[in-house]
Image: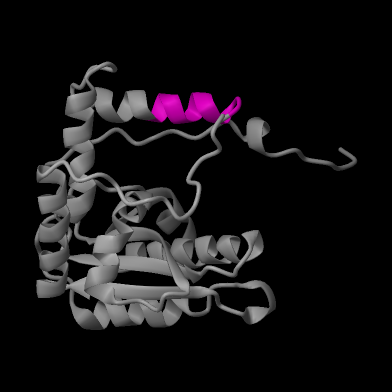
């Protein structure tokens, strides 16, 4: 698979089979991903890879919290600006309409939306999950580095025939994740990432992208 195919075939998959992902494949992906770029090569990411019983236990903890109506953990970072301005607000709204519309969930049916969202904390059935942390002292440039690392991981997974879904949703249960992983106190959980083989019986529309002229300005002499 070439780079272009990996980029265009990568998407947030929200339905996985329970097919085992070989450890050597995950090790190969994460070993290669260490070559992701970072400013001054500080490599600010801290990743934990869960499979088997530890992941099953984490899913159980999260499921029990959801079933009991336990409140989300106090946020440790702001996922979106309080007032998301145009055109970002419209893009986010369009995604929500498309995502839940494909499931037959009406816009005002908050209970059904919450049930659909709860699949996040079961990793959409995936047998492997990566949890990515960053040091609390790091700034915006280092968070950008972490994003490049995660993108590198996702593209390498595609090269192995695997799919993924990054999930900031796990930051809402960061205490449960910490109970499983015992990360150092100075680290903050950015996101989880479900990893596995796609369940092709689960269909979701591919989210489109803005036209090039909305996001790129060419400055040249043509």
Using the image as rendered, state which of residue 19 and residue 175 is in the foreground: 175
Q: Is residue 48 magenta?
A: no
Residue 104 position by quadrant? top left
Q: Is residue 178 above or below residue 201?
A: below
- Span highlighted in magenta in the image: 85-95
Q: Is residue 9 above or below residue 184?
A: above
Q: Is residue 211 above or below residue 36?
A: above
Please state the horizontal and vertical placement of residue 162, each as a whole percent of the image.
27, 62
Using the image as rendered, state which of residue 16 and residue 144 is in the foreground: 144
Q: Residue at x 31, y 67 (%)?
A: 130
Q: Residue at x 28, y 57 (%)?
A: 163
Q: Quadrant of the C terminus?
A: top right
Q: Residue at x 30, y 30 (%)?
A: 99
Please state the horizontal and vertical placement of residue 119, each as a whole percent of the image.
18, 45
Using the image as rendered, state which of residue 24 and residue 126 is in the foreground: 126
Please state the horizontal and vertical placement of residue 220, each as a whole percent of the image.
86, 43
Q: Is residue 103 visible?
A: no
Left or right of residue 156: residue 222: right
Q: Is residue 90 magenta?
A: yes
Tag count in the figure?
0
Please state the horizontal and vertical placement of residue 66, each as a whole percent of the image.
15, 45
Left or right of residue 88: residue 197: left
Question: Which coloring applies here?
Answer: one colour
Using the image as rendered, state which of residue 56 and residue 1 is in the foreground: 56
Q: Quadrant of the N terminus?
A: bottom left
Q: Is residue 56 visible?
A: yes
Q: Main secondary structure of the magenta part?
A: helix
Q: Residue at x 31, y 82 (%)?
A: 27
Q: Which residue lies most toward the right here?
A: 221
């Amino acid at each position: 698979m070439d780079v272009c195919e990996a980029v265009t075939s990568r998407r947030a998959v929200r339905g996985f089979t329970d097919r085992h992902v070989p450890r050597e494949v995950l090790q190969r992906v994460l070993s290669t991903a260490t070559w992701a770029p970072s400013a001054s090569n500080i490599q600010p990411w801290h990743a934990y890879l869960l499979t088997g019983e530890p992941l099953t236990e984490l899913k159980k903890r999260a499921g029990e919290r959801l079933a009991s109506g336990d409140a989300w953990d106090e946020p440790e970072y702001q996922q979106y600006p309080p007032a998301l301005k145009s055109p970002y607000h419209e893009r986010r709204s369009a995604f929500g309409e498309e995502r839940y519309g494909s499931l037959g969930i009406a816009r005002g049916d908050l209970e059904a939306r919450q049930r659909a969202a709860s699949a996040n904390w079961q990793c959409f059935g995936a047998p492997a999950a990566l949890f990515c942390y960053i040091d609390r002292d790091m700034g915006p440039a280092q968070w950008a580095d972490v994003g490049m690392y995660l993108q590198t991981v996702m593209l390498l997974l595609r090269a192995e025939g695997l799919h993924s879904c990054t999930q900031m949703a796990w930051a809402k249960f960061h205490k449960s994740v910490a109970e499983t992983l015992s990360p150092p106190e100075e680290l903050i959980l950015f996101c989880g990432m479900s990893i596995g083989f796609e369940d092709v019986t689960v269909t979701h529309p591919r989210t489109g992208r803005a036209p090039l002229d909305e996001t790129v300005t060419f400055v040249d002499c043509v």
